[in-house]
Image (cartoon, rainbow, N blue to C red):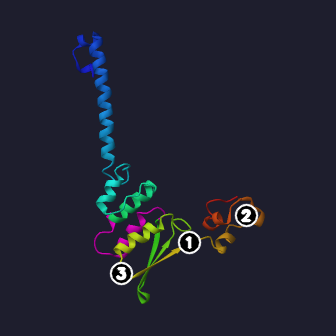
Amino acid sequence: MLDYLPRYYGDSRTVRNLTAQEAEEIIQLQDRIQDVLRQFFVDTAVWGLSYWENVCGIPVDENKPKEQRRSVIKSKLRGAGTVTLAVIKNVVDSFENGEIQLQENFAKYEVVITFIGKRGVPPNLNDVRTALREIVPAHLSIRFEYTYLRWEELDKANLNWDELEALSMTWDQLEVWKPEEKKL
């Protein structure tokens, strides 16, 4: 800031001190402005998530992880309008581990959702279920399916029992393991 003043002010200790303090205040103000601006976007909001939840009519739960809260907000924002398979997919994709395959079962009046992004049950399945129940017509049931390690996949990894044991995995870890992720 001193560069914008006449040169003779550069010799004044008072002016140098004053401009240094003003510069520090301006930097802090810019930081606060940037922080407020981040709250306008769901992906970068932190303390502003509660405002987003209020706007969307979602109960505020400060104990829930921020990423899960963001997922619920995004699903609520994406779920507006006519419900199609694309809308359902878009809503579920907004959640953590939300990569899915959709199937309509007209004979049974149901929508089958298979989680394929990661194996096992997603950590925020209740949020997914709640979001879908709000948008899917009441006459349709929603069935969830999950992917786990199948014997055929384990056979394709060509591991003997010693190699499999050397991976030091618990049964739960083995159920969600993808053989192509770790090969010996």
Quarter where residue 178 is shown: bottom right
Q: Position of residue 14 (x, y in %)?
A: 28, 13
The residue carrying mark 2 is 164
Q: Position of residue 92 (x, y in %)?
A: 42, 68
Name the residue type under label 3: Ala
Check residue 87 for magenta coloring. yes
**Which numbered marker is on residue 138?**
3
Q: Position of residue 70 (x, y in %)?
A: 39, 57
Q: Which of the image's four quarters has the N terminus?
A: top left
Q: Which of the image's four quarters has the C terminus?
A: bottom right
Task: Specify start and end residues of the magenta stretch as a single range.
Answer: 77-97
- Tell me what residue is drawn at x 46 percent, y 61 percent: 96
Q: Secondary structure at mark 2?
A: helix
Q: Secondary structure at mark 3?
A: loop
The residue carrying mark 1 is 147
Identify the mark nearer the N-term, 3 or 1.
3
Q: Is residue 2 visible?
A: yes
**Which numbered marker is on residue 115?**
none
